[in-house]
Image (cartoon, rainbow, N blue to C red):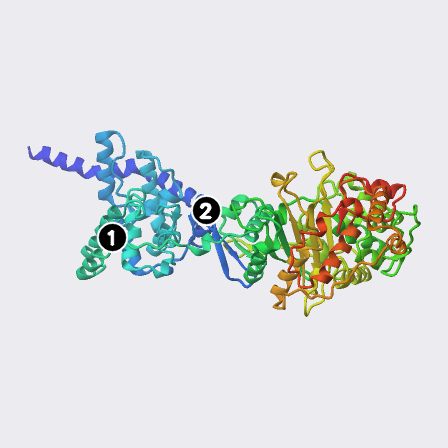
Amino acid sequence: MAGSWRNAVKVIAFIPALLILALTPVLIWGYCYANWVLAGFSSAKALSTVFDQNSFLYDENGNLICEIHGEINRTPVSLSQVPEHVQKAFVAIEDERFYSHSGVDIKAILRAAFSYYRSGRITEGASTITQQVIKLYFLSPEQTLRRKVREAMLALEFERRFNKDEILEFYLNRVYFGEGAYGIQSASKVYFNKNSSELTLAEGALLAALVQAPSANDPYLNPESAQRRRNVVLEKMSEQGYILKSQGQETQRKPVELNSDVSLENYRSYFLDYVMDEAVGVIGNDKIFKGGLKIYTTLEPEIQKKAEQVCARTDLFPSEKVEAAIAMVENGTGAVKAVVGGRQYGVNRGFNRATQLSRQPGSAFKPIAVYAPAFELGYTPDSVISYEPHNSGGGYYGPITIRTAVQWSRNVAAVRLLNQIGVDRGFEMAAKLGFELVEEDRCLPLALGGLTKGVSPLQMAGAYAAFPNGGVFIKPYSIKHIEDSQGQTLYRHPQGTPVMKASTADFIKDVLRAVVEAGTGNRAKIRGAQAAGKTGTTELPDTAEYRGLSGNKDAWFVGFTDRYTTAVWMGYDERNMDRQHYLTSYGGNQPAEIFRLVMAGVMGLDDRPAGGYVVQPLTEEQKAEQKKPEESDKQAEQKKQGDSINQVKPGKQGEEKKENEDTNKQQNDPEGKSNSNDNEEQKDPAKSVTPAPQDEEQKALSQPVKSSP
């Protein structure tokens, strides 16, 4: 009998050795597996490379504008930015032995194994915080025994590599809190509109309460359930000595208080929409919404706000449905300073008229496609463009200088000059200034902005900014640079390229100042600052729908001061245009006024009209008409109509006559108080008088798209 016991003892003594021998392959496998999975994972890179995180937009002065994210809203923070009482709330409810175990709670593992044996599936988790980190970072959420074993192996190795504070930091930045918030910082913003460092005991306990069942305990949907679970957390903290019992009881009596008005995240504007479009274009959608990037923009909120306020003024628009867009660029840098894509901001990242519009620019394109290339060839503002009278009613102006032609936006002068210098030169200059033209644009209508694809206000502002910038073109940009979460620069804005002589730029500034000082753009004159610019108007399409109407489709003003260039567009959206809804405004009217108001506001100057409007000079025909006193007014009017119809197609408005009418009215109403659309734009379009174009010029002016200032 004694011998049997001795033999039994010997066998029992070998059991540990047998177990060790049997487990050795498993331990070796576990060690190799853990090292393979954790290879390259470090605390320095974990928060920035392992999971999706929010990106941040900053303004010109480095102030945070807003956070952006995709489906996952996460902003990593260090553990030092989480108060100790908040840390302890999570430890108390999620893993009370967190600071004493080595990554695996043996009791919890045995309990889970027994549960699996009874039901055939994992019904109890009871994982440690370390195991939850492993599951969140490295494993799928499947509930199998195999995954549980892997989790345990990785947890043991993880604890060997990282200390408890690092592990808790990983956990707090990864876990889901409901309402789309991942991580303690995002949850703090979503529920309390504050940073994690500012969380109170009650707030921290509530967040800890959400982790187990975010939907069931959502304080917005189930405030009673959320409060009950929060109080359980407080009881656990009291039991484990993290807070005094009296402190816990006092906090339990407090109601759940939320403050979800996250002003930064709710801030939206056309400018930010453009920033997002530019960022996605240079970095890619995934990185923008998931990469934790820092995007430094050119936004100056006060400038943007002033432009938005002007565009929202109802008194500047002839009707409620007339839309407008504004784009402002800093001349010397190309930095975009204002983007207003409509009178009121609508849908997030909806249609942005300032950047996505594609409309004919009319006469505002003349400095780009005609006069700049002419000055490159040696023409000057005083160079003369000669006319030959076509007939007695030809509207003969006599020899005209380029300065005067620009000042009063003479269409035929622009077409004739482009014909003289060659269409190719105008085409090439437009391309250098950032316009994407097609071969069909290589024709004389280019002089009048008759483009196949059209342009946007931002493109026009960018092109005009090259003139005050000494002939250097910088593609407009809203992003100065982008950094990744490690501070490495991923992108910088483009640099400028000289596209014309400095003398050419000076000549353009000279002639465009004449437009504002005493020409078609006189309403853009700014008190206390020297401005230059050009008007542009495109007429209604020559289609059956608009045939017989006297009106316009687009009205532009593009101009600059020493520091800024601003493009203004006004018109109806295509879907809102019909025979009752079309423009009777033109570029020298409201668009020029909007330019003045925006620029004066930005520079802190008096935005009242500068006054001193001048009358456009008479044509030779008009002078001749004044010398016939024996003719009745009615006969003279009929004769003018008959002569004009020979030169301008029915239903089209001649620009010189319109601007003459406008400046006459401005002289009588220098403060611009009357409705500029009530009188002059209702006149018969056939009364317009322009120099008679010949040959190729006649063809250019007969194209479907016509322009006027």
Q: What residue does disc 1 label?
A: 92
Residue 686 in the image: x percent, y percent? 79, 44
Badges 1 and 2: C-beta atoms under 8 Å apart? no
Residue displayed at 17% across by 61% down: 246
Relative to 135, is 500 on the left or the right? right
One can see residue 489 in this view: no
Distance of mark 1 from mark 2, alpha carbons? Answer: 27 Å
> Looking at the image, which residue sits at the far left?
1
Q: Splitting the image into 4 quarters, where does residue 408 fall?
A: bottom right
User: Quick one: 538 or 374, which is closer to the camera?
Assistant: 538
One can see residue 541 in this view: yes
Residue 111 in the image: x percent, y percent? 22, 39
Relative to 271, is 470 on the left or the right? right
Instruction: Look at the numbered disc 1 and give the secondary structure of its residue.
Output: helix
Count of numbered marks: 2
Q: Dot 1: within a 10 Å radius of its alpha carbon, few (fewer than 14), some, or many (20 or more) residues?
A: many
Amino acid type of disc 1? Ala
Q: What residue does disc 2 label?
A: 52
